[in-house]
Amino acid sequence: MTKRIDQPTGTETVGHEWDGIEELNTPLPRWWLWTFYASIAFSAVYVVLYPAWPLVDRATAGTLGWSSRGDLAKEMSAAEAARQGVFAQIAATNIEALPANPELMQAAVSGGAAAFKVNCVQCHGAGAAGYQEFGYPNLNDDDWIWGGTLADIEFTLNHGIRWEGADATRASYMPAFEGVLDTGQIGAVTGHVLSLSGKAKGNAAGATIFAENCAACHGPAGAGMPEVGAPALNDAIWLYGGSQAAVTKQIRAPRHGVMPAWQGRLDPVTIKMLAAYVHSRGGGQKAAPARPATEPTGDVAQTKKAENDG
């Protein structure tokens, strides 16, 4: 490998030659060299001041004691402190008074949305549309078996529906009419129920059977009675389906859904925020329907023929 001085540039070659082409040994620019040296000096200082060298279960701490995890912990602590302030305001506010404070109501709705994704989507779905095939109600409409005010929803969340072990649980039971009514009578009352929402023509026999067996809970016009958990039958909203077959099946052998009582499982503020979120989905009621002086308990409600799948 023969080095020589390139005459036009005065620069030494590296000694390589290929097909008559030689490479010049041109020195790097001084500015580049000084930048390189400064980078080396900076890195030497950095590894002393900040975490740098990975060890088995941690990294070298650095003399400043800073770490990204420590920074994150401080930010999370600050966020938690701010959140606790909002939680305290929500806890101190009666749920029916939340709408009067739009900012606090929005905070409650946001917190409830997060809690809903963890605890409720398994049955009601991510969009709260429910699953009719399993009798999980749609929370986006304005049809409520037990009432849709903020207080009603909070009560239902606290005590559940037909939940064993919860003394104040919502409890209504519709009797099975198979064996009580014959096939013709069940067909007639099915037709009458469907006629209440315009899905079939009415019939006198069905209207009579309905008046004698169903109107006490569902009302003469099928408008329902939230105070005893009897769903409305005169709209287009159905819990288990509104086809003739589905309504007939519910009359013959009613299905009764169950929802857990969240009191004791979730803290009161989370339950209040969940109620605010469910209420905000679009179907929440502003005013409570007429109620008896006392909330019907399981034993009382069971004596009322309450829940058709509506």
Image (cartoon, rainbow, N blue to C red):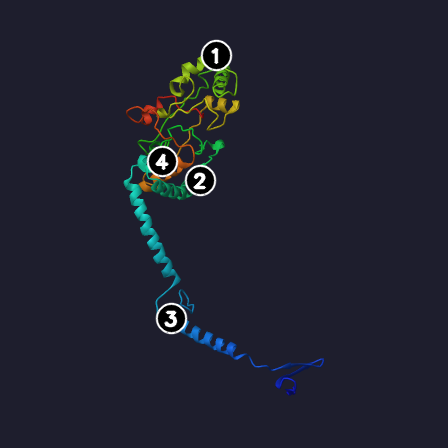
> What kind of element bears circle 3?
helix
Q: Which residue in the rendered view is the most extreme toward the right? A: 19
Q: Of discs 3 and 2, which sits in the foreground?
A: 3
Dot 3 or dot 1, earlier in sequence: 3
Residue 1 sits in quarter = bottom right
> What kind of element bears circle 1?
helix
**CA gap, disc 1 and disc 4:** 40 Å
Which residue is rendered at x = 32% and y = 46% of the image?
86
Answer whether residue 266 is visible to the viewer in this image.
Answer: no
**CA gap, disc 4 and disc 2:** 14 Å
Q: Which residue in the rendered view is the most extreme toward the front? A: 8
Q: Are marks 3 and 4 in contact (CB under 8 Å)?
A: no
Residue 296 sits in quarter = top left
Amino acid of disc 2: Val
Answer whether residue 80 is visible to the viewer in this image.
Answer: yes
Dot 4 or dot 2, earlier in sequence: 2
Q: Are marks 3 and 1 in contact (CB under 8 Å)?
A: no
The residue that mark 3 highlights is: 49
Foreground: 121 or 237? 237
In-image side of 78 versus 281 (left or right): left
Amino acid of disc 4: Leu
Residue 27 sits in quarter = bottom right
In-image side of 245 versus 58 (left or right): right
Foreground: 100 or 303? 100
The residue that mark 4 highlights is: 157
Q: Of discs 3 and 4, which sits in the foreground?
A: 3
Dot 2 or dot 1, earlier in sequence: 2
Amino acid of disc 1: Ala
Amino acid of disc 3: Leu
The residue that mark 1 highlights is: 205
Which residue is rendered at x = 30% and y = 47% of the image?
85
The residue that mark 2 highlights is: 121
